[in-house]
Structures are given as structure tokens and as C-alpha cells.
Amino acid sequence: MRRLQAPSGPAEALAGALAAEYAAVFAYGVIGVRLADAARTAARRAETAHRSRRDALVLQLSEAGSAVPADKAGYTLPFPVTDAATALRLAVEVEERTAAFWRVALPHTTGADRDRALAALTDCAVRATRWRRTAGVTPVTVAFPGRPT
Amino acid sequence: MVLTCPVARGRTTQRDRALGHSRRNILRAGALLALGGTVAPLTGCDLFDRGDERDRVPDPLEPLAAQARELAARHRAALAAHPGLAPLLTPIADAHEAHAGELAKLTGRPVPSPEPSPDATATGDRSAVLAALREAEQRGRESAATLCAEAPADRAALVGSIAAARATHVEALR
């Protein structure tokens, strides 16, 4: 996933969020196959949610005439995913990193765009909390979701 | 900055005499105002006239900070009644206090201590306590989300993070 940098304006902030959503969709493909039962179902749901944010952003950016960054064939994962434990750890990390891109979009947006950015930040933060609980990580919450630590 | 409270200053002579302030104290306060005018301009008004709240322009984020303190107090009260909930509730209470602290930094206004809540969140069995906390967090999430929508750019990220944090609290308390 790309590193978080301060965007110069709304289009760049949303392009950053889109790049994060592409990477999240890719990561969940890797995560899902290492999980079983309820966790696998949760991973599939999360993947669907990220796909839908991705599609909405592609539409929004192209309608605004802004540059739409392209998806990549693959993304470098921060660590190898070899079992359920590493899959859960990656799921937490994906949600935390994606949340950070949406948080950065908040100051650059207003009105309905701001509401969408907040909804996306909130969804990522809530999924991170669920994954921490599934992984047995405590505490399951962080004080400032999306804020780089 | 000092000129933000001309009315209050005009009244000081009478009031201060009534309160028994010495001339030296008033001069000292004036010197403090001159020095600290940019740091805490409203403190100047308070020095002379504690009762005149009308001169004080409220910051839209002050209620959010007060709510954060109130939520922290609710969790601490629940903890006192159910110490077994500490691993779950302590980080949440700490987060609310961190939110209040960051908001105070942003607004430059001190956060008032929460008044003791008359509704007894902490009473009842464990599940009733958690249900009451969930409801309070949900209300808190909604008010933070409303404020985030209206916030100027330099405040949107912090208020948005607080709204998201409260949503994660609702989830954690399930």
C-alpha cells in the first residue's frame, strides 16, 4: 500500500483513498483464503464493502473530470500471509491504513463528500475493531481511528 | 485581544471595589492581560467579571468536549460497579479523556468537569450497564458526526476521528 502523504486538494485526497481501496480489495483476496467459517464470511463482506467504495470513487473522480489512478495487478503486502493469524493481522492493518486515507480526505471535502468520507472512515474503524476482537488483540479500540501513530 | 471585553472592563472599578480587590491586584491583572492576551484572552474577562458569560463567544466544539468528559465519567462509574469490565471499559474511558484533551487544545477552552449524572448508568446487571453505555456512545457518535459535517477544514479530521472512535465503542460494547 502507498504511504500516506498530505494531499494538495480534494481530487488528490480522493485519489489517495481510491488507491487505498484498490489495495484493500487485493489484500482481502489473500486474507479470505486463509480464514474459515464466520471469519471468512466477514472477510468476504469487508471485500464487498471496499469494492463498493472503490467503484463509487472511480465514478466520482471521473465525473468530476479528475485523474483516476489505475489499479495494479498486485500489491506488496507488509508481511507474508501464511495462516489465519497472519491473515487476521493483515485485515486489521488494511482497515487501519485505509481509515487513514479517508481521514486525510475529511479536511479536503465538504457536504455529501465529507459525509461519505466520514462514513468510510467509520466503517474501516469498526471493521478494524471486529478484526482485533477475532484475532484476540486487546484493546479492540484505538483512541483516534485513522490518525497515524 | 484585550479589547474583546470592553464592557466588562468598564465595570471593573465598581465591582472590584465591592469585592475588595486592591489597586495593585488590578494593575497586576492588567499586566497579566497584556502578557497573556494572546494565550487566554477570555481569562481576562473572568478575572474581572466571572458572572458575565454573555461576553464569551461559545465554541461549537465545547459541547463535544463536555460530552467526551461525560462519556468518560459514565465508563468510570460502570467500572466501579463492575470491575470485571476493566479490560473493555478502561481503554474506552481513556479514549474519551484523550478526545476531551485534544478538543481543549484545538479550541483553547478548558473542558468543564462533568456534572454527576443523575441517571444511574452504572446500576443493574452487566448486560444492562453495557446496553446503557452502548446507547450513550451511539448518541455521542451521532452528535460528533453532525459536528464533523459542519466543521471547518482544520477541525474535520479530529472531529471525524472522534465520531469514528465512538462508533467503534458501540461495536466493542456488543
Image (tube, helix red, strand yellow):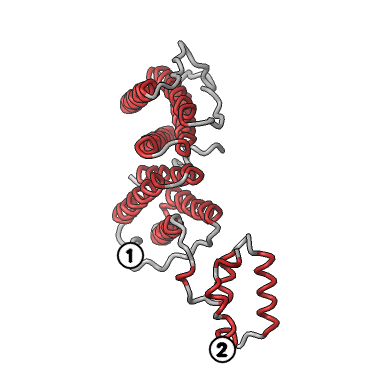
Q: Amino acid at mark 2?
A: Ala
Foreground pick, B130 / A16 = A16
Along the horizontal axis of the image, is B77 left or right of B109? left
Task: Identify the residue at horizontal 58%, vertical 74% (top origin).
Answer: B47
Q: Position of residue B38 (x, y in %)?
A: 63, 60
Residue at the spot of label 1: B120
Q: Position of residue B19 (x, y in %)?
A: 57, 86
Task: Identify the residue at horizontal 29%, vertical 55% (top origin).
Answer: B128
Along the horizontal axis of the image, is A103 left or right of A6? left
Foreground pick, B48 / A90 = B48
Q: Circle 1 marks a residue in which chain?
A: B
Q: Is residue A111 visible?
A: yes
Identify the disc placed on residue B18.
2
In front: mark 1 or mark 2? 2
**How far apart are labels 1 and 2 at the CA level?**
42 Å
Against A48, is B79 above or below? below
Q: Amino acid at mark 1?
A: Ala
Q: Quadrant of the C terminus of chain A?
A: top right
Instruction: Look at the numbered disc 1 and give the secondary structure of its residue.
Output: loop
Q: Is residue A129 visible?
A: no
User: Outermost residue, top direction?
Assistant: A73
Q: Circle 2 marks a residue in which chain?
A: B
